[in-house]
Amino acid sequence: MVPPVVLDMFETMVAVDPTASLAYLYSRVVAAEYRRFLGTFFTPREYAESMVEHYANQYDDPKVVVDVGAGVGSFSELAARYWKTAEVFSVDVNPFTLGLQAVAMSQRCRLKTRLVLGDYRDWLKQNCKAGPTLYLGNPPYTRWQLIAKQNRQQLVADALGLVGPLANLSTLFFGMSLVKLTQDDGLVMILPSNWMHARYARELRAWLRKQVNRKIVLRRADSWRFDDAMVDAVSVEVGPQCRGLQQMAISSWKMDRCFAVQRQDGEKAIRFAESGDSPDTSSRSEVLLEQYARIVRGTATGANRFFIRAPEQWRDFEIDEAYRTPLARRLRAIEGREESVPDIAELLCLEMYKQGENKNVDLLIAMGERDGVDRGYLCSSRPKWYDLSNEFRRPDVIISTFARERFHVMVNVDKLAISNNLFGLYWKEGICESLKESILCWLRSCDGQDALRRCSSEEGCGLLRLSPRRVGLIRINRAVCCGTAGSSSKECS
Ligand SMILES: C[S@@+](CC[C@H](N)C(=O)[O-])C[C@H]1O[C@@H](n2cnc3c(N)ncnc32)[C@H](O)[C@@H]1O
């Protein structure tokens, strides 16, 4: 029997905000590793509402709204609230989340949605449109490797050439929805941003550029957290066809920074717009940081608590030094010192390890398996779940991911590995030492720190977060790279 106090709490929770509460409950009860296959990660209300509101403020009400992978129904509920006369279809393959949506909607008797239990691809094929339609939602971010082999070919075929093999399911659903758009239809979806650059979505990007009579806005929601993984996400809004040429643009989430995508720039159009750049200005006075260096997030172990420990903890387990490598967990400033300093821990390093080789390491592995570490998403995708040797790198420079004021930039003299709280900068070949020095000096200067802050996104409470791609797109004045920069590149205290 459920204790009355639990029942009471449940009823209160559901009465206040049923959709958000039930989504929260589901994500607490079902572990992230079991939600990966269907990509069941829920959209925070403020993001979903901002997308729906932005579309509703610009276009006529749709007659039909399709919530693609509706889950517990945050988009469906918003659609029913914003477009009172529209028929809202909530399509999902998961009977549990759809059932929770039925419970949530039963609390909102004035809002109606039609629950469709089934595969979106099948639904899209069978359903006959009944008027201007909006394709809406957060389609499942299921990686290609996790899509059942027997379905892959058909999914690619349904996107009619816009999306190629290796794409994740959200890009495939995005592509197959785009090809369904008729004149009065629109689309608003939040997606991992890989499609903006990946080869598999080349034709999709070309298709979007050709839609000159549709307004297209790509709003970046950088470094979106899919429970245990960080992904850069973007909301794609494609309006119905209108008279005359319409703008295509990339903007920050709050739309306070917006850059036109010059469709005539072809494949490079998105990249130029992302850097707030154009071919002209970049060749004249500025260069992108990515021309000199690659910026990559540190190692995602999949279980930091297992793989990363302080040296004394490893000693407690009697793990020999040969199986550990120093790693920077985070960077700190120390008063009176110019360079940032790392908080050092050690990463378990079992390259070529064969079980039976060392009894303490074997015990540690067995302990990890007892605790289910091997079944986590990242661990279970490795040939040997405990062997990170193909994943960890020792960057040339370490950059902090978060900051309130100042982002640390530290030369990695000790060749430390880094955790995924940090970014690694790797110089491209042929960059001379004095140029490296000038770039780092500029990154630490007031101008460089301003540039880092401008390309960050705000996490709330004044905390700023960088994304590796945006850092790569920072523009540096050529004078910095030629060593002729003046006072603007002075260290910022
Ligand atoms: C990223 S979640 C989004 C949930 C909800 N719309 C939200 O934004 O909070 C993706 C949803 O797609 C559903 N899904 C996965 N594969 C699907 C398929 N083939 N057809 C329809 N829905 C699917 C999952 O069950 C999951 O609920």
Image (cartoon, rainbow, N blue to C red):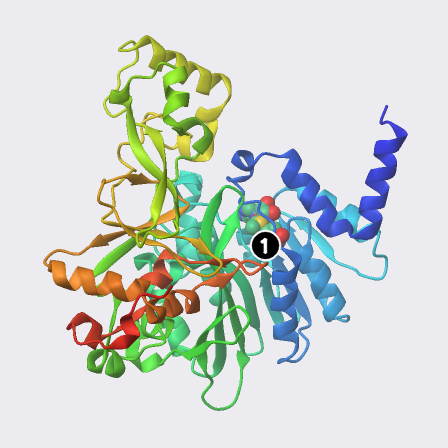
Q: Residue at x 49, y 16 (%)?
A: 370
Q: Which residue is mark 1?
A: 123
Q: In front: 413, or 425?
A: 413
Q: Residue at x 45, y 34 (%)?
A: 377
Q: Is mark 1 within 8 Å of ligand 1?
A: yes
Quadrant in the rendering for residue 344: top left
Q: Is residue 37 positioned above or below 323 on the image? A: below
Instruction: Quadrant for the N terminus, please.
Output: top right
Dot 1 amino acid type: Trp
Q: In front: 99, or 132?
A: 99
Looking at the rendered structure, the secondary structure element under dot 1 is helix
Q: Residue at x 62, y 55 (%)?
A: 44
**x and y percent of residue 12 in the render?**
85, 44
Residue 161 is at least partly visible in this image: no
**x and y percent of residue 176 in the render?**
47, 60
**x and y percent of residue 120 in the render?**
56, 52
**Is the residue marked by circle 1 packed among few (<14), some (14-19), or many (20+) residues within 10 Å?**
some
Instruction: Quadrant for the C terminus, please.
Output: bottom left
Q: Is 124 left, or right, of 286 in this rendering?
A: right
